[in-house]
Amino acid sequence: MSTRFGAVERKLNIAITRAVREMTNAIFMKSQANCPVQSGDLRDSGRITNITGGAKIRYTKKYSARREYGMPAGRVIKVRRHRVGGFVGPMNRRVGGHMRGPFSYKSSKEEGSHFLERAVKEETPTLSRRLTRHLRMLSK
């Protein structure tokens, strides 16, 4: 048997979770629209994961943080040994190409696009409206 305060607390937690998840979906949609696209791999790697009390947005490509925040000049980037050129021929055999690497180089300055940060800043003011709406829905 729960106390009246426990019931209120439970409804409040449910409303907060629903409002945060709704806002996370809106943030994700805006970040997808603002995401820089060359091949579409970064945009396609975006995922929303529901966690206790809310949700989490992740972009799983290795370079996603570099696209979001940028990179300072002079950072050393290491490139592992890799195959360049060639193609896959008949019977799935690689034809042509050659191996390169490993090597390292110093980066030039890259500006971040801040696609996720902009989406969060645009959606943050709507949290109170979303929370109010979900509280009203639960109190009826």
Image: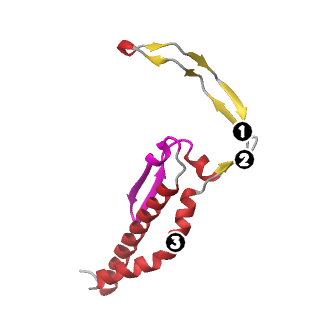
| Label 3: element kind | helix
Q: Residue furthest left?
A: 1
| C-alpha separation, residue under disc 3 versus residue under disc 1 | 34 Å
Name which residue type carries label 2: Pro
Label tally:
3
Q: Earlier in the sequence, mark 2 or mark 1?
A: 2
Task: Residue 126 in the image: state x and y as whole percent.
Answer: 47, 75
Asked whether, in this view, residue 118 is left or right of residue 18, the answer is right
**Residue 124, label in figure:** 3
| Label 1: element kind | loop
Asked whether, in this view, residue 72 is left or right of residue 117, the answer is right
- Given residues 109 and 55, the one toward you in this image is 109
- Given residues 39 and 99, the one toward you in this image is 39
Range of residues picked out in magenta = 38-63
| C-alpha separation, residue under disc 3 versus residue under disc 2 | 28 Å
Residue ID for mark 2: 72
Name which residue type carries label 1: Ser
19 vs 30: above or below: below
Q: Earlier in the sequence, mark 3 or mark 2?
A: 2
Colour mode? secondary structure
Does residue 75 belong to the magenta stretch? no
13 vs 34: above or below: below
Asked whether, in this view, residue 137 is left or right of residue 96, the answer is left
Residue ID for mark 1: 107
The residue sitting at 55% across, 47% down in the picture is 64
Q: Residue furthest front?
A: 38
Task: Residue 83 in the image: state x and y as whole percent.
Answer: 55, 20
